[in-house]
Image: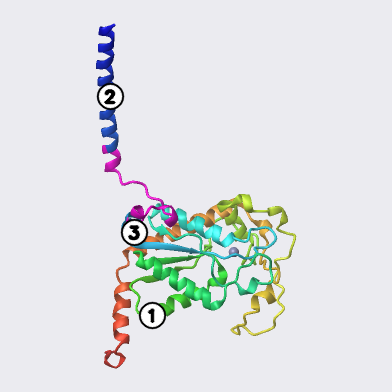
Amino acid sequence: MIRTRRSCTVLFTLMSFLALGRARLAHAQTASLPPKLSVHWEELTAADFREGIRRSQGTCLLPFGILEKHGPHLPLGTDLLDVRYAALHAAEQEYAVVFPEYYFGQIAEAKHEPGTIAYSRSLQMALLQETTDEMARNGCKKVLIVNGHGGNEHLLPYFAQTQLDKPHDYVVYVFDERTPQAGGPAKKTKIDMHAGESETSKMMISRPDTVHLDRATNESGADQARQKLPDGVYTGIWWYARFPNHYSGDGSAATKELGQYQMSWWIDSVVKAIKAIKADDVSLKLQTEFYEKTTHPLETQP
Ligand SMILES: [Zn+2]
């Protein structure tokens, strides 16, 4: 009885020792690998956020979407869902911290449709400026806005240009491509600007559960060409004049193959942009030099 208890104690001690050894080994193995960090800003702890900023070399992504009708068959958040899918996958490949859901852009032209959230012009600019300022205050010295919404195509370059109006210790970059010019499966439609073949195909990759392909022909996405003006004359009502259903193209032509091709292209393009921005040591230097010169333009040498 005593002997049994003693041998049990010896065995237990030996097992504990071995277990401790294994635990130490496991700890040493994980300590040698850098811990996996989420690319989602909101999922990081404060300490991990600090490590994320170090690992991303201060490069942060701001995927920019909108809430607007997308034809009769796609969800209101299509642009945000698609752009976040591309940006998050890109950041997984080339580490960057990705800002949470942002859909506060320009969409006045869809205010006649249900579900559109169209903030005022002044709020759009103020919110975007304060957002990038706050990102920079937290170490994002290179902010890449990845645009998912065609209606922001003038807003974002204007925002980037107006960063020169007063000194900033960070650089705003804008990436505004969503669809490759050529290549991949042949497209079946000619007009393809909004909720059409390309955008519907990409949604079949990012969120197939939200695509109602059977409803894609319930409304017309044809160009109604109701305005007769020469090329080069711009009006804000041009979009409504051409596409009053807030639908441009024919989503029923969409395929998963086209979506896969375009989404892979988009992700690769964002990866290339992140790499180039990390390597860019010129923009901030020139910006700082420029700001200094703006304080004494008469002494600026040609
Ligand atoms: Zn869209």
- The magenta stretch spans residue 38: yes
As rendered, which of 256 and 149 lies closer to the eye? 149
- Residue 197 lies, in percent from the top left, at 63, 60
For marks 3 and 2, give the one nearer the viewer: 2
Asked whether residue 154 is in view, the answer is no
Which residue in the structure is indicated by mark 3? 53
Q: Residue furthest right?
A: 218
Question: Is the C terminus in the top left, top right, bottom left or bottom right quadrant?
Answer: bottom left
As rendered, which of 138 and 292 lies closer to the eye? 138
- Residue 86 lies, in percent from the top left, at 49, 57
Classify mark 2 as within 8 Å of ligand 1 or not, answering yes or no. no
Q: Residue at x 59, y 55 (%)?
A: 203
Secondary element under disc 1, as helix, strand or loop, is helix
Which residue in the structure is indicated by mark 1? 164
- Please say if 100 is above or below 10: below
**Amino acid at dot 2:** Ser
Label 1 Cα crowd, 10 Å radius (few <14 / some 14-19 / many 20+): some
- Residue 275 lies, in percent from the top left, at 36, 60
Q: Is residue 152 left or right of residue 44?
A: right
Label 2 Cα crowd, 10 Å radius (few <14 / some 14-19 / many 20+): few
Q: Residue at x 29, y 34 (%)?
A: 26
- Please say if 29 is above or below 280: above
As rendered, which of 15 and 159 lies closer to the eye? 15
| Separation of residues labelled 3 and 1 (CA atoms) | 24 Å
> Of label 3 and label 1, which has the lower sequence position?
3
> Of label 3 and label 2, which has the lower sequence position?
2
Which residue in the structure is indicated by mark 2? 16
Magenta part of the chain: 28-50
- Residue 127 lies, in percent from the top left, at 48, 72
